[in-house]
């Protein structure tokens, strides 16, 4: 089930809010958990059992760390048994993620290597292909953060299994984030407030997020799909296509995050901010302080710092940055293009680290630095959007006039420059560089703001009836 669908907006969401507020305080988490399982299992009920399995294992591991009354205070020594529970949790989650997300990729990569070496007889032919469960990258990271936080002493182990199940399965952020760490929400699972102000801000978040998705991301996505899937016919078409994809992925993902934050507020939860004007950055380092903040913090706290961070010398720092970004690329998808995307960002993070976390074009005026950073982001999005490396190289060739388009390229140009797409593209650019972010805009809700948000939602719902299947990009991650 997706947020931008009639069944969610007109049926699931009203029913959920009605039941949630009718249930007594002790029954709210159980009701929310069951409704979240319904939400997640709508497309494939079998995937619910995977999430349940991960939930049970991590809950038992967290409880097992203190079953004998061992201390989990910060700085206190950890027993062998406590370390064993932590390892069990990490290995089970990574094994689940590795099997469903990377087994097909590993087999295909192996077969490609042996074929290139002339050893076709060594290929591994499998009789089945594994389907990737929706949101598995998000809920495994989220569930795993619980046992790590408990082991470190940053959070107390939760005793109520229903509360923990609610934390893992909560439908607003279940499928595409933001990645909510347990310590960020532990207190809210015990007690939280439900106020009119919080509910009103949640509605505003949802309205603006839906508008981003339907009115901006989807039209820009149509332009990007035509350019990347069929091949741009001219240099301008190629740059237009990748810029449209940059807007699509930003408004698609930030729109989902806005809706998730808004739904959380309607249920009394306050989720952390996930975007902060990333395309206004003046360096790649700054981009990662503004883009997908929940993933950046997760990688920093659970991978970069444990690897040593910047505490073990300059070379180790650069190696850690590269490793973390490559891992972040693989987290997004099982493809060598995602590895290259991560390596691209890791390379610039290392270069900027050598410059004192400033870009190598730091002496230029601010707007020029912003423009250069955006162009670098466009280059990285080519890897992210293309199906494979040859496709990326072909698209780069189109961007620099070194590769010609296909026979239907002229037809594509006639479509992507229609007034509707140009207006949507211009509106996306204006929102990116000329408007306040949703988080800032909704700090205080006035009557004009409320009317504005409801009008946008009304227009978005009308447009939704004219659009085909429009899943969120991050659903596949």
Image: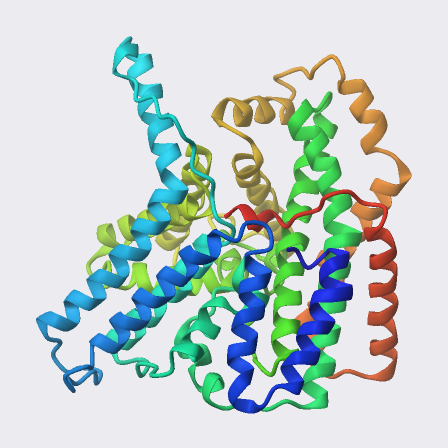
Q: Left or right of 241: which side holds 477?
A: left
Q: Which residue appears at 50% of the width and 91% of the height?
A: 191
Q: Give the camera-side residue of 267 and 410.
A: 267
Does the image show residue 54? Answer: yes
Q: Quadrant of the N terminus?
A: bottom right
Q: Is residue 226 above or below residue 216?
A: above
Return the x and y of residue 60 as percentages of the image width and height. Answer: 27, 72
Q: Is residue 433 above or below residue 114?
A: below
Q: Which residue appears at 21% of the width and 75% of the height?
A: 64
Q: Left or right of 147: which side holds 415?
A: right
Q: How many marks?
A: 0
Return the x and y of residue 32 as percentages of the image width and height. Answer: 56, 75
Q: Residue furthest top?
A: 118
Q: Is residue 190 above or below residue 249?
A: below
Return the x and y of residue 65 as percentages of the image width and height. Answer: 20, 76
Q: Is residue 154 above or below residue 467?
A: below
Return the x and y of residue 254 as percentages of the image width and height. Answer: 63, 59
Q: What colour scheme was applied to this rendering of the protein?
A: rainbow
Q: Which residue appears at 34% of the width and 45% of the height?
A: 98
Q: Quadrant of residue 240?
A: top right
Q: Quadrant of residue 107?
A: top left
Q: Give the camera-side residue of 166 and 423.
A: 166
Q: Which residue appears at 27% of the width and 74% of the height?
A: 62
Does the image show residue 152? Answer: no
Q: Left or right of 413: which side holds 68?
A: left
Q: Residue furthest left?
A: 80
């Amino acid at each position: 089930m997706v947020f931008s669908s009639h069944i969610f907006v007109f049926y699931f969401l009203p029913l959920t809010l009605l039941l949630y507020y009718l249930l007594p305080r002790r029954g709210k988490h159980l009701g929310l958990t069951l409704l979240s399982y319904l939400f997640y299992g709508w497309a494939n009920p079998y995937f619910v059992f995977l999430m349940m399995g991960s939930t049970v294992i991590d809950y038992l591991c967290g409880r097992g760390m203190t079953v004998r009354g061992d201390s989990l205070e910060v700085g206190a020594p950890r027993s062998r048994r406590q370390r064993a529970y932590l390892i069990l949790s990490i290995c089970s989650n990574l094994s689940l993620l590795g099997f469903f997300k990377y087994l097909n990729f590993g087999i295909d990569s192996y077969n490609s290597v042996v074929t290139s070496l002339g050893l076709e007889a060594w290929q591994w032919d499998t009789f089945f292909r594994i389907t990737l469960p929706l949101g598995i990258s998000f809920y495994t990271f989220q569930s795993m953060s619980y046992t790590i936080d408990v082991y470190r002493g940053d959070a107390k182990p939760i005793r109520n299994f229903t509360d923990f199940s609610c934390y893992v399965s909560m439908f607003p952020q279940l499928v595409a984030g933001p990645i909510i760490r347990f310590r960020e929400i532990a207190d809210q699972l015990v007690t939280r407030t439900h106020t009119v102000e919080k509910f009103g801000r949640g509605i505003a978040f949802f309205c603006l997020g839906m508008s981003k998705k339907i009115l901006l991301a989807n039209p820009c996505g149509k332009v990007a799909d035509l350019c990347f899937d069929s091949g741009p016919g001219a240099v301008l078409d190629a740059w237009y296509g990748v810029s449209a994809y940059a807007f699509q992925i930003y408004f698609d993902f930030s729109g989902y995050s806005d809706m998730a934050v808004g739904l959380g507020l309607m249920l009394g939860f306050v989720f952390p901010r996930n975007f902060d004007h990333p395309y206004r950055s003046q360096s790649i380092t700054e981009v990662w302080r503004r883009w997908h903040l929940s993933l950046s913090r997760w990688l920093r706290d659970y991978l970069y710092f444990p690897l040593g961070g910047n505490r073990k010398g300059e070379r180790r720092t650069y190696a850690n940055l590269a490793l973390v970004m490559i891992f972040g690329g693989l987290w997004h998808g099982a493809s060598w293009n995602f590895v290259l995307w991560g390596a691209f960002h890791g390379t610039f993070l290392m270069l900027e680290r050598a410059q004192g976390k400033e870009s190598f074009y730091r002496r230029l005026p601010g707007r020029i630095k912003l423009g250069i950073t955006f162009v670098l982001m466009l280059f990285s999005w080519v890897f992210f959007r293309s199906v494979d490396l040859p496709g990326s190289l072909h698209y780069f060739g189109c961007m620099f006039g070194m590769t010609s388009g296909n026979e239907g390229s002229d037809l594509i140009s006639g479509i992507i420059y229609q007034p509707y797409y140009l207006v949507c593209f211009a509106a996306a650019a204006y929102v990116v560089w000329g408007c306040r972010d949703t988080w800032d805009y909704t700090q205080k809700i006035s009557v004009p703001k409320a009317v504005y948000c409801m009008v946008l939602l009304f227009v978005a719902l009308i447009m939704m009836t004219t659009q085909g299947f429009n899943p969120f990009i991050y659903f596949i991650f």
